[in-house]
Amino acid sequence: NAGVTQTPKFRVLKTGQSMTLLCAQDMNHEYMYWYRQDPGMGLRLIHYSVGEGTTAKGEVPDGYNVSRLKKQNFLLGLESAAPSQTSVYFCASSSYEASNQPQHFGDGTRLSIL
Amino acid sequence: AQTVTQSQPEMSVQEAETVTLSCTYDTSESDYYLFWYKQPPSRQMILVIRQEAYKQQNATENRFSVNFQKAAKSFSLKISDSQLGDAAMYFCAYRSARWGGSEKLVFGKGTKLTVNP
């Protein structure tokens, strides 16, 4: 009963390094999302996807790229990490057929950029 | 664009008492969903309660209930008989019910609830 799984859970990067965060869901959901959470800011949408092969920008997309090559996976990439990207990142998914249902969240990834 | 405002960054309540967390939102849409999520120190995002805008009746889940005032665009959360395990960040969230939309959530900045023994 995995739901939404994020890897890794923690990561420390140096400025300028690149990395990819992986989100996997086993609920056959069409929609997937990447949020970042910063103190006092709530959760802000970075990018989202409404289906395999599609992506769209959210509220704070700069410095990030995403890909949805498979329906169950949604990848978030940082090409050149900056200290401002230090945050907790959450992936979520939801079903197209159940619009009144909540989004299901992963447990988050804490990312620190030095 | 829709916005969600939680005007209370922090709240505290005595164990077994009642507390109300405030949330207001701004939208031009008539059909939408509202949610309250709880985030304990474990960092998990846990759905507490949801409300469909077309329903006049306020949602209730055990000790949690909402006061949904559509005209005032207000969606407060009442926690009755507060327990130590209720201590967490609480986020109010909005989602459009527009057909073919992205189903994305718009979150407030959160209210940190402390429960005192």
Image (cartoon, coloured by chain):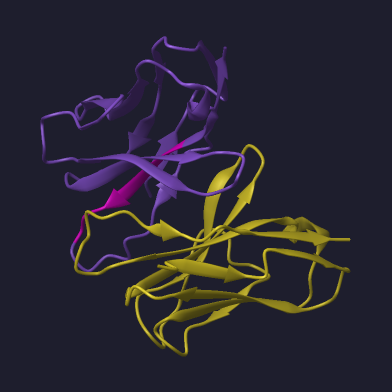
In the image, residue A71 lies at what x, y percent? 39, 84
Quarter of the image containing the C terminus of chain A?
bottom right
In the image, residue B62 lies at what x, y percent? 26, 28
Tell whether B33 sits left or right of B57: right
Above or below B52: residue B10: above
Residue at screen point 39% across, 28% down: B23
| Residue B54 seen | yes
Residue at screen point 27% across, 26% down: B65
Above or below B37: residue B6: above
Residue at screen point 25% across, 46% down: B33
In the image, residue A39 lies at what x, y percent? 67, 40
In magenta, the rendered stretch is B91-98
Tell whether B76 sits left or right of B99: right
User: Residue B88, located in which quarter of the rendered image?
Assistant: top right
In the image, residue B94 lies in the stretch drawn in magenta: yes
Quarter of the image containing the N terminus of chain A?
bottom left
Tell whether B26 sits left or right of B6: left
Tell whether A45 sits left or right of B2: right
In the image, residue A45 lies at what x, y percent? 51, 58
Chain B visual colour: purple
Query: In the displayed image of the protein, which residue is found farthest to the front?
Result: A1
* Chain shaded yellow: A
**Looking at this view, is B85 or B59 the one in front?**
B85
Above or below A68: residue A21: above
Query: Majority secondary structure of the magenta segment?
Result: strand
Residue at screen point 67% across, 64% down: A9
In the image, residue B102 lies in the stretch drawn in magenta: no
